[in-house]
Structure formats: structure tokens, C-alpha cells
Image (cartoon, helix red, strand yellow):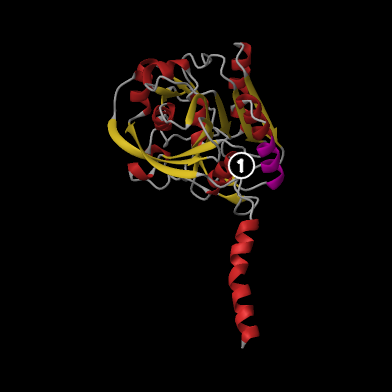
């Protein structure tokens, strides 16, 4: 009987011992949830500086272990909402001593996904959300306002790329702060905007898959070339065999995103009065245009993910002067 009791007591302590031995560097010291004031508006209204409908979007702030004012990476999701890659990146940054702020740009707008109908939400709305998050973080007592980076994925990557434009900052960024760098993952670069090479000296680091047929990397190369010609600090890193969303930890290496819309065959340019024009037709762009195609591919790629994590980690450590 005594032996059985001892055995039961020993078994009861196993979970506690296992928990104590689990690495904890990537666990947030504190998690806070925020309501972010933003707006929902058309791309045309965004481009002309016209206010839209007030909306509140959400933010999850995972404060890294440490003391004092810490650096932060703001994470902006894609057309499918907050996916598992957001959690992975948040933990990776926390393990580095960097806090992570994940924005949910959909729930407050009554959306779950825009993948099959991108017209549900103007592509530039997420830029407003990122500026709203910046306003919250810039005055947070645990944040160094000089060390806040914006990172986004797909639709969110497009937002992270074009949030760098000085013109958009002047019109919409009321935070009094600026992002220290921009890290877009597999963004769509098929749209060109007026004065879109005016991005200042802030670093832009783009990560893309060569096999991506959702937002092909080819659409980004002309923009990157124009930025470089203008003397901007921009780099494009490409990964072989990497599909769209290659940094997701779940799912198959390659699957059809059934019904998802892609503008891979479109070339879009901002015209007068903030109208986005389909350059092939000469008419205002719409998601009913012939160039809008369906069923691109998505999929994880462990090798590309590991390489991207290492590259982003090195960049952030250098930028933030971390050990």
C-alpha cells in the first residue's frame, strides 16, 4: 500500500517536472489585448485622403521577457486572417527579447476571409490598421518607440510594403512615430502608386517564393528596381520551390487555394483622383476584370521557412542592436 502511494505521488510530480524543463524563452511575459481605432474605406478614398466608416479592429500584444522599453515587431495577416505562422513568428521574436503585436484586421469588420472575394475590403485598409497599432505602441510604457518594425504577409505584406510611402504617412499616420523597418512577405506588387518611390531611408526587406503563382515575385522586381534607382534601402530575397504562404507550419507543401482570386495577370496603376486603372483595358480596375484569375497555389516549405527565419532574425538583431 505504501509503495503504491509513493508511486502515485511520484507520478503526480511528473507534469510539474516536465513543465519546469520546458524551454520558456519564447513565452510572453505578459499578453495584452487592444481595441485599435481605424476606418473602413475604399482604396480611392484612401488615396485621396477621404475618411471612411469608423471601425475598431483588434490587436494582441505579446510582451517579451525583459525589463524596460523593448523593441516590437507588428504583424499584419493576409487574406485568410490570422494564421498559424503569426504565432510562430510571435514566439520567435519573443525568444529574441522582442515583443510582438499581431493585428486582427478582419473580426472587427465582420470578415473571416477575403481570399475568394477581395472586393470585400479595399487593399489599403490594412495600412490604416498598422498606423493605428503604431499609435498605441508609441506611447506604451514597455515599448521603445524608435524600435518598432512592421512585418506583413500576402495582403498584409502588401500593406507592410506600401505603408512605407511618405505620402501615406503624411495623410494617415497620426501617431507621431514611424516604423524602423518594413518586412513584407510574398506581397502583391502589381499596383503602382503616385510617388511610390518616396519611402525615405527606412530599410525594406522583402521575402518571396520563386514558385509563388498567387503573388508572383516577378511583379515585385520592377518596383524593387525603381526603389533601388531612387537610392532606397531595399532588398528582395527569393527562395526556390517556395509557394505562397511558405512560412506556414501546417498543411501540405503545395495545394490549390480553390476559389481564391489572384491579380497575377493584372497591371494596375493609380490614375487621377485616386482611381486605380487596369492598364490593359484603360478602365478602372475591378475584381470582375478578365485579368483576375482563380485557384493559385499555397503551401509550406520547411527549408525556405528556416532560411527566412534566420535572415529576419539576423536583420532584426542588427537593426535593434540586440546581443
Residue 218: x percent and y percent?
A: 63, 29
Relative to 128, residue 106 above or below? below
Residue found farthest to the front: 2
Q: What residue appears at the point 33 percent right and 24 percent down from the top-left corner? A: 45
Q: Nearer the viewer, residue 116 or 122?
A: 122
The N terminus: image quadrant: bottom right
Q: Is residue 219 magenta?
A: no
Q: What residue appears at the point 57 percent right and 44 percent down from the top-left corner? A: 91
**Neighbour tally class for label 1: few under 14, some 14-19, many 20 plus, Cα within 10 Å:** some
**Where does the magenta region start and end?**
302-310
The C terminus: image quadrant: top right
Q: Is residue 310 left or right of residue 35?
A: right
Residue found farthest to the bottom: 1
Give the SS element for disc 1.
helix
Q: In terms of secondary structure, what is the magenta stretch mainly?
A: helix
From the image, tell me which residue sits under label 1. 95
Residue 198: x percent and y percent?
A: 51, 13
**Rendered image quadrant of residue 276:** top left
The tally of labels here is 1
Amino acid at each position: 500500500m505504501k509503495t503504491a502511494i509513493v508511486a502515485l505521488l511520484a507520478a503526480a510530480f511528473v507534469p510539474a517536472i516536465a513543465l519546469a524543463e520546458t524551454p520558456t524563452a519564447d513565452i510572453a511575459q505578459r499578453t495584452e489585448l487592444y481595441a485599435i481605432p481605424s476606418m473602413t474605406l475604399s482604396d480611392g478614398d484612401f488615396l485621396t485622403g477621404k475618411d471612411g466608416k469608423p471601425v475598431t479592429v483588434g490587436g494582441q500584444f505579446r510582451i517579451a521577457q525583459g525589463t524596460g522599453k523593448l523593441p516590437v515587431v507588428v504583424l499584419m495577416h493576409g487574406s485568410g486572417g490570422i494564421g498559424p505562422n503569426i504565432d510562430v513568428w510571435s514566439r520567435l521574436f519573443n525568444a529574441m527579447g522582442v515583443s510582438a503585436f499581431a493585428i486582427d484586421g478582419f473580426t472587427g469588420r465582420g470578415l473571416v476571409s477575403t481570399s475568394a472575394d477581395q472586393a470585400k475590403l479595399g487593399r489599403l485598409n490594412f495600412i490604416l490598421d498598422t498606423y493605428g497599432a503604431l499609435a498605441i505602441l508609441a506611447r506604451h510604457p514597455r515599448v521603445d518607440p524608435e524600435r518598432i518594425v512592421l512585418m506583413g504577409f500576402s495582403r498584409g505584406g502588401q500593406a507592410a510594403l506600401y505603408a512605407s510611402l511618405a505620402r501615406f504617412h503624411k495623410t494617415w499616420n497620426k501617431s507621431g512615430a514611424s516604423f524602423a523597418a518594413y518586412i513584407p512577405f510574398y506581397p502583391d506588387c502589381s499596383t503602382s502608386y503616385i510617388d511610390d518611390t518616396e519611402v525615405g531611408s527606412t530599410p525594406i526587406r522583402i521575402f518571396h517564393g520563386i514558385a509563388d503563382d498567387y503573388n508572383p515575385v516577378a511583379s515585385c522586381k520592377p518596383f524593387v528596381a525603381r526603389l533601388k534607382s531612387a537610392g532606397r534601402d531595399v532588398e528582395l530575397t527569393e527562395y526556390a520551390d517556395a509557394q505562397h504562404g511558405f512560412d506556414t507550419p501546417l498543411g501540405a507543401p503545395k495545394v490549390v487555394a480553390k476559389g481564391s482570386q489572384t491579380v497575377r495577370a493584372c497591371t494596375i496603376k493609380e490614375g487621377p483622383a485616386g482611381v486605380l486603372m487596369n492598364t490593359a483595358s484603360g478602365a478602372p480596375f475591378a475584381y470582375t476584370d478578365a485579368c483576375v484569375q482563380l485557384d493559385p497555389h499555397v503551401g509550406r516549405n520547411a527549408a525556405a521557412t528556416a532560411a527566412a527565419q534566420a535572415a529576419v532574425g539576423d536583420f532584426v538583431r542588427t537593426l535593434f542592436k540586440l546581443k
